[in-house]
Amino acid sequence: MKKIFLFILIVTISSCQSIEKNKKPSTLLSEDEMVNALTELTILKSLSTVTSGIKRNSGINTKDYIAKKIQVDSITMMDNLAYYGYNPEKLKAIYLRVHDTLEKRYVLHDSLKEKYMKDYYPSKGYNKFGDNKEVD
């Protein structure tokens, strides 16, 4: 009985320790830079999921691409994610902006593809997905 009581006491005392707030990274990215970085990472991740064979054969190194594109190394990115993670409202706002950016890019891509198909294949009957099928 004493062992159980001692165990519960130790667990209670150790769980009451204060959690230190994550320190500000040496290179703190602004919210705009975080949105840009997370948007690029999301696109790259989706490309690697959809076209894994193509990506493997193309020789694209994800870390190098991101480092060149957004000029942020992976350690800095992780430090910033941890830092912003301690403020969930800010991180939520950043991810909402990433979602909005991706939506805008999708709509732009879709409209450009549709215009391309109409301009270059007007008599072929292509639908907006580039399929050579009759449009209902």
Image (tube, rainbow, N blue to C red):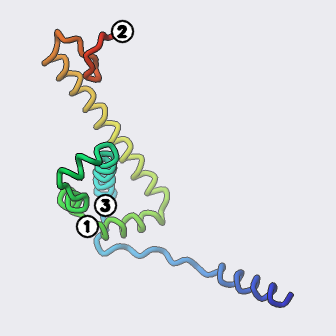
Q: What mark, if any, has residue 30 been given in the picture?
A: 3
CA–CA distance in space, label 1 to label 3: 15 Å
Q: Nearer the viewer, residue 64 or 104?
A: 64
Q: Earlier in the sequence, mark 2 or mark 1?
A: 1
Residue drawn at 34 percent across, 73 percent down = 25
Disc 3 residue type (three-letter) = Ser
Q: Nearer the viewer, residue 133 or 32?
A: 133
Crowding around mark 1 (Cα neighbors within 10 Å: few <14, some 14 to 19, many 20+) is: few
Residue 40: x %, y % from top left: 28, 51
Which mark is nearer the camera, 3 or 2?
Answer: 2
Q: Amino acid at mark 2?
A: Asp
Which quarter of the rendered picture does the C terminus lie within?
A: top left
Residue type highlighted by circle 1:
Asp
Q: Is residue 4 above or below residue 98?
A: below
Q: Which mark is residue 136?
A: 2
Quadrant hosting residue 135: top left
Residue 50: give x, y in percent of width and height. 32, 43
Mark 2 neighbour class, 10 Å CA radius: few under 14, some 14 to 19, many 20 or more? few
Q: Quadrant of the N terminus?
A: bottom right
Percent across and percent down for residue 104 are 31, 36
> Local crowd at mark 3 within 10 Å, few (<14), some, or many (≥20)?
few
Residue 123: mark: none
When the figure is inspected, residue 5 is found, relative to residue 84, above or below; the finding is below
- Closer to viewer: mark 2 or mark 1: 2
Q: Position of residue 61 (x, y in %)?
A: 21, 59
| Helix, strand or loop under label 3 | loop
